[in-house]
Image (cartoon, helix red, strand yellow):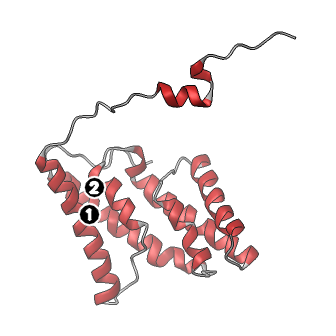
């Protein structure tokens, strides 16, 4: 049997040690910083106002805070695109509901299953959106077993985020949103 030689870059530890110390990514200018933060303030404030103050429709879930970071601070990133954030939240929410319907309990296993199923389905459908990993947990933690939860607050909130992101990100000269639809 031939001996397999390993180099530091092929071992897990070697890969870790090979990483650069600094990213090399330049710091953004103050306008970019302010426009990103203002976008997050605007969308989270709006979703909460609609959901809590007016009681028109429920349109807010906690993972939308992380979605706002992506959509308003990195609007060109793949994870920020409409397909990714809408599809990701819907797939993840459905995953959590299915797990809750099957097991009807909150445990390390059901939380792990909901999250793992959501990740696998987001990858296979090319709808990966990291904040949606938390959306998969909400139905399990809150005992949500109705698929109407996907309509409101999830889909309604996503559509409000989309409309605001389209308007807001395209007002700024150096931004263009979306980079792609599908």
Left or right position of 5 against 78: right
Q: Which of the labelled discs sits on residue 102, or is there none?
A: none
Identify residue for label 1: 40
Vertical comparison of 88 with 124: above or below: below
- Graded by Cα atoms within 10 Å as few (under 14), some (14 to 19) or many (20 or more), the crowding at tag 2 reads many
Vertical comparison of 83 with 110: above or below: above
Q: Please name the residue shown 33% across and 61% down the image.
A: 68
For numbered disc 2, what is the local secondary structure? helix
Query: Residue most toward the right?
Result: 1
Q: Please name the residue shown 56% across and 25% down the image.
A: 14
Give x and y (percent) for residue 61: 43, 74
Give x and y (percent) for residue 41: 23, 67
Q: Please name the residue shown 57% across and 66% down the image.
A: 136
Left or right position of 44 against 128: left
Spatial CA span between label 1 and label 2: 6 Å
Vertical comparison of 93 with 13: above or below: below
Whether pointer 1 and pointer 2 mark residues with C-beta atoms closer than 8 Å, the reply is: yes
Q: Please name the residue shown 67% across and 76% down the image.
A: 106
Determine which quarter of the picture holds residue 12. top right
- Name the foreground residue: 31 vs 6: 6
Give x and y (percent) for residue 138: 54, 73
Give x and y (percent) for residue 113: 68, 62
User: Could you tell which of marks 1 and 2 lies nearer the N-terminus?
Assistant: 1
- Name the foreground residue: 140 vs 153: 140
Identify residue for label 2: 72
For numbered disc 1, what is the local secondary structure? helix
Query: Residue most toward the top?
Result: 2
- Count the labels in the image: 2
- Graded by Cα atoms within 10 Å as few (under 14), some (14 to 19) or many (20 or more), the crowding at tag 1 reads many
Determine which quarter of the picture holds residue 111. bottom right
Q: Quadrant of the N terminus?
A: top right
């Amino acid at each position: 049997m031939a001996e397999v030689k390993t180099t530091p870059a092929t071992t897990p530890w070697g890969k870790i040690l090979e990483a650069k110390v600094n990213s090399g990514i330049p710091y953004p200018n103050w306008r970019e910083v302010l426009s990103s933060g203002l976008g997050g303030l605007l969308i989270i404030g709006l979703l909460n106002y609609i959901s809590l103050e007016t009681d028109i429709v429920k349109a807010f879930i906690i993972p939308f805070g992380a979605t706002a970071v992506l959509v308003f601070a990195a609007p060109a990133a793949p994870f920020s695109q409409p397909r990714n954030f809408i599809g990701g939240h819907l797939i993840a929410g459905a995953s959590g509901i299915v797990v809750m319907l099957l097991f009807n309990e909150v445990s390390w296993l059901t939380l792990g299953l909901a999250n793992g199923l959501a990740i696998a389905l987001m990858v296979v459908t090319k709808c990966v959106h990291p904040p949606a990993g938390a959306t998969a947990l909400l139905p399990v933690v809150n005992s949500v077993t109705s698929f109407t939860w996907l309509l409101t607050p999830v889909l309604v909130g996503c559509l409000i985020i989309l409309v605001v992101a389209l308007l807001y990100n395209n007002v700024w000269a150096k931004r263009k949103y979306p980079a792609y639809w599908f």
